[in-house]
Amino acid sequence: MSTMVQAIRMALHVAEERHDLTDVFGEDVGPPLGGAFTATQGIKCAWNTPLDERGIVGASIGLGLAGCRNVGEIQFCDYAYNTIDLLKLAGLQTWSTNGDWNVPMTIMTPVGAGIRGSIYHSHSFDATATHIPGFKIAIPSTPRDAYGLLLSCIVDPNPCFFLVPKALMRVRSAPGEEIPGEPGDERALSKMIDAPLGDRAKWQPQWPDTPDIFIPFGEGRTLRRGRDLTVVSYGRTLPLCKKAADELSQEGVEAEVIDPRTLHPYDWPRIRESIKRTGRALFVNEDSEISNFGEHLLRRTVEELFYELSAPPRLLAGAFVPGVGLADNLEMASVPQLPSIRDAMRQLAHQQA
Amino acid sequence: MSTSLRPVPRAPDSDVSPELLLRIHDLMLKSRILEERLIAMYKQGDGYFWIGGPGEEAFNVPLGLLIQKGRGPQYDYCHFHYRQSATLLAMGADPANAMRQMKNTATDPYSGGRNFCNHYSIFEWNVVPVTSTIEAQYAIGIGTAIAQKRAGGRGITIVTGGDAGTAEGDFASALIWSSRPANPLPMLMVVTNNKWGISTPWTGQHGEKRISERGKAFGIESKTIDGNDPEVSYRELAAAMEYVRSERKPFLLEALVSRLYGHSSASGANAVVDEADCLKGFEKKLEERKLLTRQQIDELRQKYALELQEMHRKVRQEPQPKGDTIYQNVFMDRDKVREGS
């Protein structure tokens, strides 16, 4: 039963063995560390770069132009802001040449709060990523989704963002959601693929035999069915929404919880059908609330479903402040937490039409 | 003029034969007339913006002649900037395509009317898309060079930019990544130094005497040459390229050039008179060596002027892209860059 970070590692292994992944690179990505979060331990094609995010994104584009499927890692998405124009260039290589070139590349980066990462290790990136046309964007919330979405990113002929919610990296698969072929015993898996502490020079991972799983872009997942309201969330806030929905069920409120899994393209038919049925919509994420991707979904809800709504749709997102403060109270007040999500869901469910 | 840090293989002078000199002149002249035609198109309302490279032909034509063009890592990857129409012509590009991009026609093969003039893209020749954001090509070139190092062979990555752009961090990225002890890269980094950054003179912003000297700290073979002399450019480029092809290591080449029509149409696109004109200087030499007469030069100029004028007339009739095509080619279903790999 893997964690998300182990699932990422297994996907990279499968991709380098079976799907022509040639390079996984970034700061501390290669041996001996294997990534700041250990996501690249044991990967043969992983290598270390200078501390230069622009070089990493540039190299990723260039490798892609040369036909090399690659994953470039930005150690924290907070460090990607000085690469924005290169990301824009990656996204427009195909469009600006009217289809002369494509760029198979994946930018993998940890996102979001939840680890008391302070101002420069807590940013979200979904609002920024969804403002860069030409990229496909995946954001998993379970180990199995991480495995299947990362493989889809790697084999896609276009630039992809693979956004990894930091707070969920050590969360294990729920029963029944394991990756086929992985050991059920977490200690057995750890012994196989987690690098030992100390000298790792002679260590070799023993990879479980896991299959190809390609979760398509634009195919969301309904975690929980419900009749009273629709909640759309992803990343760190998704499990909180599910938990809040389970709790509210005790009060007789049945919320439907949807994980779009990919933000571009995204599964609008699933979201639309659900909102039409429930008449109430809540969008939850932890990026700052102004020019937020949830605002886009909210706008589309109003434009397309206005006469189907029983209450005004709502967005619950991060505060529009420059950063997430370090102190516990500051972080808790900056991004949605279980109580605020539960309250928002309850209020929306009971709001008079 | 040259400030070589270490001896570099040098092509013998005899490599630049009279036939080659005449070919270089022919391409330089044609390129100059093409740029003048593009400026005329702008001034006649057949384009919204002009930017180009008149004044850099003496360097850019030899570069184009020496490039191993083709598709994939065994051939040279070209990360150009927007002043290299002469390089494109020397590689064999159709000048009508530059006009199509200037007129933003649907037939523009570089961008389908989506991008400024001289923003080339030729998949079959490894000419990767030119960007308006200066210097980003130095970061992107790292990736193609890594692929070529791994592939083996003699293909190299050629990155070209201007002097002002070297202030951007991507130039430092290229110096650092190309000289990593773990994996030095077959990368020819070219800086065509025209001594201007739009309206700002180089001398007021840069303390370094020679840009090429920045390579010294990284152990990169580096040189500054007279890019206004096509013979010098050809020889030095040949030697630098041979070094990169065979040693699979980087080279930094700074070429001192002129800028004869200002930065772009934003500054008027008018001829300047106080900078050396490489074409005039070369023609004087060819006359002195009895390789061409003034009459032959004038006839050649007239021939190309008429040819390109007629081309312009035809391009003007070609269709503009339709508005409903804007959503085309945001994504590709086809993995074109990997086909055949």
Image: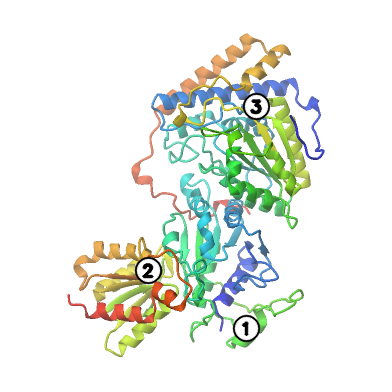
Label 1 resides on the chain identified as A
Label 3 resides on the chain identified as B
User: Considering only order in the chain, which callout, 2 or 1, is on the residue closer to the N terminus?
Assistant: 1
Residue position marked by numbered label 3 in the rendering? B58
Mark 2 residue type: Ala
For residue A189, the mark is 1
Is B118 above or below relative to B310?
below
Q: Is residue A172 visible?
A: yes
Residue at position x 47%, y 21% from top? B310
Q: Badges 1 and 2: C-beta atoms under 8 Å apart? A: no
Residue at position x 42%, y 78% from top? A329
Residue at position x 70%, y 22% from top? B21
Observer-nearest of A202 and A102 = A202
Q: Is residue A335 visible?
A: no
Q: Residues within 10 Å of mark 2 (few under 14, many from 20)?
A: some
Q: Nearer the viewer, mark 3 or mark 1?
A: 3
For the residues labelled 3 and 2, the Cα–Cα distance comes to: 57 Å
Q: Secondary structure at mark 3?
A: helix
Mark 1 residue type: Leu
Q: Quadrant of the N terminus of chain B?
A: top right
Q: Secondary structure at mark 2?
A: loop
Residue position marked by numbered label 2 in the rendering? A319
